[in-house]
Image (spheres, grey):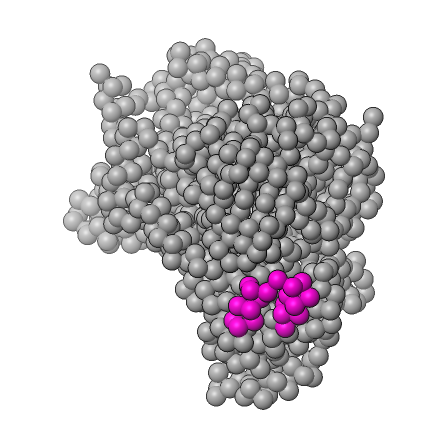
Amino acid sequence: MALGRYLLSRLASSLYVLLGTSLLMFILMRLAPGDPIDIMFGRTHSGPGLGLAREERLGEIREELGLDKPLLAQYIIWLGRVTQLDFGVSFRTHRPVAVELISRLPATVVLAIFAFLIQALLAVGFGILSAMQANGWLDHSIRLVAIVCTATPIFLLGLLLLYLFGVRLRWVSISAPISFRQVILPALTLGVVTAPQTMRVLRASLLEEFSRPYMIAARAKGLSERTLLRRHALPNAILPTVTLLGLSFGSLLGGSVIIEALFSWPGIGKYVVDSIYVRDYPVIQGYVLVTTVFVMTVNLLVDFLYTVLDPRIRL
Amino acid sequence: MNGHNLTSSSKAVERHRVVSLLTLLDLPYSILAGVVLLTIITVSALGAPWIAHHNPTEQHPQERLQPPSGAHWFGTDRFGRDTFSRILYGARISLAIGSLGLVLVVSIGLAVGLLAGYAGSWVDAVAMRLVDALFAFPAVVPALVIVGLFGPGLINALLALVSVWWVSIARVVRGIVLQIKQEPYVEAAQALGASPLRIVWRHILPGVLGPMLPLASFELGNLILSISSLSFLGLGIQPPSPEWGAMLADGRSHFAEAPYLVVFPGLMLFLTILALNLIGEGLRDILDPTSTYIVK
Amino acid sequence: MAWLVCEIVRRSGWALKLTLVTAGLIALSACGEAAQPIATEELVIVDESIAYGLDPADQWGGYYLRGAGAAEGLTRFAPDGEAVPELAESITAVDLLTWEVKLRPNVHFWSGTPVDAEAVKASLERSRRLDAEAAALLDGIRIEVIDPITLHFFTKDPNPMLPVTLANYPLVIYNAASYGEQPNPLDLQAMDLTGMFRVTSFTPRQEMVLEANNAYWGPKPQVGRIRLLQVTDSQARLLAAQDGRTHIVGYFPPEGVAELEHTEGMNIVTVPADNIVSVYLNLRSLPLGDVRVRQALSWAIDRQELVDLANEGLGQPASSWLASNPAYPDAAKQGYTRYDFALATVLLDEAGWKLDSDGIRKREGQPLTLRLLSWGIEKPVAEVLQSQWAKVGVVVEVQHSDDYGMILTRRNEGNWEALIEGWENLGDLLTIASVHFEPGGAINYGGYDDASTNALIDRLSKTFDEADRRKLLLQINTRASEMVPIIPLFARPRITAVSTQVEGFQPHPRQGEYLVTASLRIKK
């Protein structure tokens, strides 16, 4: 049936993207100067006379990890393992990459969800409000605030909020375990900065809908503004906003490095950055794979959502 | 209708748009505010060597961590360097690098978007799947890898960003191209046997440029912000060059006793991006009010 | 908004509903954590770095586990730097090549297995096999079990430093049988140590929870539970110290000291540490091959200003390699004891680097340019050096990175002139001298090879008389000051923030290794 064929074709193109991005990252990382084994043992005090034996031992370790083989061979071996769901073992911690990534996923996902909710709430709420009062003082105020929020650098906002709520008011704590309280501040920072763009798009779509002939006809029929909004304008106007929200969520799932650094949030983003520093190849490859899968999945869900919201759209 | 009339009529449309842009009285206030702000910043940046009272990289240990005063309008940092001078020179860096980045991003994005949009079929599918994937990557990851390859520094950080950011331009351009492709005058030109290059150049490109202007303004703001983010993370500029993001990162460690070290660079970033966004909003209201594309 | 959600839920199929439910569950689980009350008997410690794993023979495990109060060695370093017995009751030299170690009776691992001579030997041999650092420390040493509480250590050459050697973190004692042949860093059940606290839960590089070991052989710990958290961002650690819920914050940033003074409830504990920050010079590079240039660079540094600007005035300028070592007060009078701009310019002129009209020194048209590598917290140091050396006409290109891999690569490839790093200088000075100054030494980054220094180190390895050793070390120190393979800058103190609720915190120059002690207690 059509759905099956569509899914298959999406799957195929997604696979192509996965291969492409993972290969790209693979090559980039191998080209980057710095040998992971050297880095692992780099800061060790090593007595005199151990030089040669040490070099041998390091060479052995490189062999064990397959780092002495040609580039393409390494990639193919890795690919082969991945198809059997073996993502390898982190060079640094010796834990399976899957375990490492999964252990940090909950924190990332929680932050992503809350940031997304805040973004969606703000964008949809104020977008509707702004459009309903188009060109009135409320609309202008909302748009002004939106512009101000977009222009604020995210690390500045995060810094200020952290200082205000962490130090002055002592409402949040670095050393407390991850909880609702902990997630609010970083989620708020992310949400506030990303909401305005989405809001603007919703407002523009709504205004476009409002000016359509059928809306004028419906108004003439005497339908209330609220009904017009709910039944007609919003379902049609929401589509581009949904796309944006979906993309945003997908991006959040990859981890936000700056936010995680500022708020000491144990998410995937910062973990991957640290792994890049020590050239922990398996972890980086695993991360690329995971984030790409997330993004593809979210995109697919968004497209499905389209068909749900607008029956005219066929896959 | 024959091709000549179509071409000249689309040219007329173009001219009309440009003319209306220049009619000051029609401009919304946002553009005015944005332009004024941006002009002040740009002029300050250009005039830094004359306006700045102090050398931005000279350390004065005796004057470290002083609050804003007559001698140092924005105070001094932990090394005794004058913050106001550093802010001015930082403006030069941000605007210069940002503009360079903009040119690169727009060139690549335009090329890819036009190609994907016009060529269609598998070229489009391939390009767009790649674009989709890249679009979601936190930009820091490829930036780090590239900085790892070529070493830390502002140009390398910029190249890293450009390599990921052209994507949003390409998306938008492609969307517009797809729309324009449906237009009757394009179909007519195709039927008349005009070469794809000519069609793109004479018919499609002008239609793209309209929405591109506001987009460019937003992109410049985003680039400046991203460069600052990378510098904030320690990946961009090297000491002692002043750059707003790096100044913010350095100022963090003394936030309690010298908040102005964070506030002023942050404020400058904010104002610059605000100006560019205001200009972008205003341009969009004029040139492309019903657009629903987004800049990342 | 609610309408939107309702519409979607109503119209969509089971897949979306499932997704929403899952998302809700994840969110709820996050909320659930907040419900647990913080145990009043729990000590919360935040540090920059916690263990990678639970195996002392793997990835600095000994260091972290000792710091957490879980692992112990035959000897340990007392706060004054001396090696004192820990699991050993006594350690005496039988003859020039033999040491006798008598173990404390009735000491057990957490599992109850006795810590006898066989277990100790097994632990040391396993470490020797699996850990390069342990192998280096035990190089040339043969271990023999005499009876259940006695071991003999036979050294190839006379070695008066064995107690010091055994105090190092790679040689902590553990139950080798429990861990197995291979590195085993992640199995909590296999973990079997002797410390006053035992690990009950562990997430590598994130969190470690420990509980008091009530069967501990020494003074019983006075805290029921410890939660050790890793926070790598220094500003975040500052915030942790200010939020009222953290008892101890290790590796506290110097910039936060002034601010913490305004915060009630936290004290700053500063220990003159064994960490000396220096500039390592690449003697193979063109300008630095000339000793006059190296000396000039050292004279051109105003070390007190460096400390004031880069480390908030915390720390002591170090004039020579041994200067910060409290056992060698004479060393503080050797070397670069003052800032001498004039002498620096004279030396540079002599070396042929003349000041040009643009303020930069040139020789045959080439400017005197140095690439200065710096990593992590050394960034302010690099900036000050850049500024100070600019005054004598040297152009410094700072290459700062948080990516140690890049620093390492540049160093190995020789693409550098100067490099800022901090290293310990307490403990076995022979080894430290050797790794710094002998050709092939692990920290001899710049290729220093000086016949007279090599001879001195060789003699040192064969000298036992304490007075003679001191003389030799001071001679090595003087020679190092003359030849300047490494420019000493200052001794960086270890700063810890400790809550006023905490009593019994012991300052220690190796604070990271000796953070948790049995004396820690929380005031009621």
Q: Quadrant of residue B128?
A: top left
**Eyeballing the image, is B1 above or below B61?**
above
* Residue at the image point whose x is 47% and y is 25% from the top: A238
Please check the rendered image and state whether residue C455 is part of the magenta-colored stretch, yes or no. Answer: yes
The vertical placement of A105 against B132, above or below, is above
- For the C terminus of chain C, which image quadrant? top right
In this rendering, the count of numbered labels is 0
Tell me the quarter of the image containing the N terminus of chain C.
top right
- The image quadrant of residue C301 is bottom right
C366 or B123, which is in the foreground? C366
When the figure is inspected, residue C278 is found, relative to residue A184, above or below; the finding is below
Q: Nearer the viewer, residue B31 or B261?
A: B261
Visible residue check, residue C58:
no
Q: Which residues are magenta?
A: C454-475
C207 part of magenta stretch: no
Q: Is residue A238 left or right of residue C224?
A: left
Residue A93: percent from left, percent from top: 46, 38
Which residue is found at the position 67% from the left and 29% from the top?
C217
Give the side of residue C16 with respect to residue C521, left or right. Answer: left
Using the image as rendered, state which of residue C304 and residue B77 is in the foreground: C304
Left or right of C239 on screen, residue C373: left
User: Where is residue C267 shown, x and y percent of the image?
Assistant: 80, 42
Q: Is residue A144 left or right of residue B155?
A: right
In terms of depth relative to the viewer, which is nearer, C253 or B205? C253
- x and y percent of residue C323 in the render? 69, 65
Tell me which residue sits at (43%, 62%) in the image: C412
Q: Predominant secondary structure in magenta?
A: helix
Residue at left 49%, top 22%?
A234
Residue C408, how many percent across, how many down? 46, 58
